[in-house]
Amino acid sequence: MKIVMIGQKGIPTLFGGIERHVEEVSCRLAKKKDYQVYVYTRNYYTSKKNKKYKKVNLVCLPTIKTKHLDAISHVFFATCHAMLKIKPDVIHFHGVGPAICLWIPKLFFPQAKVIFTFHCKDYFHQKWGRFAQFSLRAGEMIGCYFADEIITVSEELNITPKNCPAHTSNCTSEWIKRDFNKGIIYYILEQENILMGCVALEIVGSNRCYLERLAVKPEYRHHGYGKLLVENFILAAKKLNMKTIGIGTIGEHTVLTDWYKNLGFIYKRTKQFPHLPFSVSFMVYKIKANE
C-alpha cells in the first residue's frame, strides 16, 4: 500500500506541531510490511539530499516561498505529483489550509482514499487577513465534506483529566490551592466582578519564571484578553526582577505557538513525552531592561 502525506514542511521535525505529528505517524506506518510511505518536503526545511528517513520516502518539491503562497503552492505541486508519479492508495492531507486542494484527487484520482486530519482552526490566527481566513475556512469545509475519512487532533487534542490532569482545561479548586501552597502567583482578569480569565506565574530561579495556567473563558475569547493577560504578566515578571519567562505549549497547536511568537516569545524545541497525548513546544521570552 502506498500512502502519501501532504501539508507538512518536512521531516525530521525541526519545529512545528504538524511536522511532529506527521513524523510520528509516518515512521510507525513505514514499519509495517508492504506499506510504502511518502512525505512531501520543502527544501528550506528538509535537505533535497535526504531521500529516506527511518524507512519513510522523502519527496522534495519546490514552493513559492511567500507568506501566502508557501503552503498552498507546495500542497498543489505535491497533490499533482502524487497523482501522476506515485499513484498512491491513500492521500493524507494535514491541516485546513492544505485541505483546500483535497477536491483535486477526489475528482481526478478517485481510486485513492483521501484522509483529512483537522489539526486546528488556523483561521483564528491574527497574522492572516480576511482573504487568507476565508481560504482557510474554505479548506476546512472542503476537508470536512469531501474526505473519505476525517481525523481530529483533539476535541481539540483528546485532552482529558485522565491523560493530561495538569492541563488548564482540567483545573480544580484543589489544584489551585496546591499552587498557592507552592508559591505560584495568580493574576485574574475581571470586569464588574465577572471572571474573564487568568494566568499564573511560577518562580523557578533567581531570575527565571514560568508562565502557566493561561485561560480565557470561551465567551470572552478572540477579543484580545489573552494578549492583555500575557502583557500584564510580563510587566509583573519584570517587577519581580525576572529576566526570562519560559512556557510550554501544545506542539500540535501551531496557531497558539505562532500567537506566542507574535508576542515576542522565541521557539526553542519540541519534545514528546510518553504520558501525554501531544508533543510540547518550549518557548522563552527575554525581558528587556527598558521594557
Image: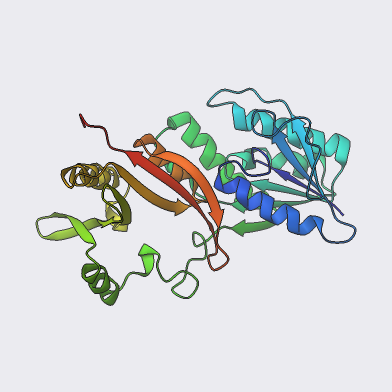
**In this view, which residue lies farthest toward the front?**
206
Left or right of 164? Residue 174 is left
Question: Which residue appears at 73% of the width and 38% of the height?
Answer: 40
Q: Which scheme is used to colour this image of the protein?
A: rainbow
Number of callouts = 0
Is residue 148 shown to the viewer in this render? no
Left or right of 77? Residue 226 is left
Question: Which residue appears at 63% of the width and 31% of the height?
Answer: 72
Where on the picture, by quarter, is residue 234?
Answer: top left
Q: Quadrant of the N terminus?
A: bottom right
Question: Which residue appears at 55% of the width and 40% of the height?
Answer: 138
Residue 87 rendering spot, x and y as whole percentages: 87, 42
Left or right of 235? Residue 116 is right
Residue 189 rendering spot, x and y as whole percentages: 18, 53
Where on the picture, by quarter, is residue 25?
Answer: bottom right
Residue 101 rendering spot, x and y as whole percentages: 67, 38
Where on the picture, by quarter, is residue 15?
Answer: top right
Left or right of 159? Residue 74 is right
Residue 282 rendering spot, x and y as whole percentages: 45, 48
Q: In the picture shown, does residue 61 fall above or below 33?
A: above
Q: Nearer the viewer, residue 31 or 95?
A: 31
Question: Which residue appears at 66% of the width and 50% of the height?
Answer: 22
Q: Quadrant of the C terminus?
A: top left
**In this view, which residue lies farthest toward the right?**
34
Is residue 43 shown to the viewer in this render? yes
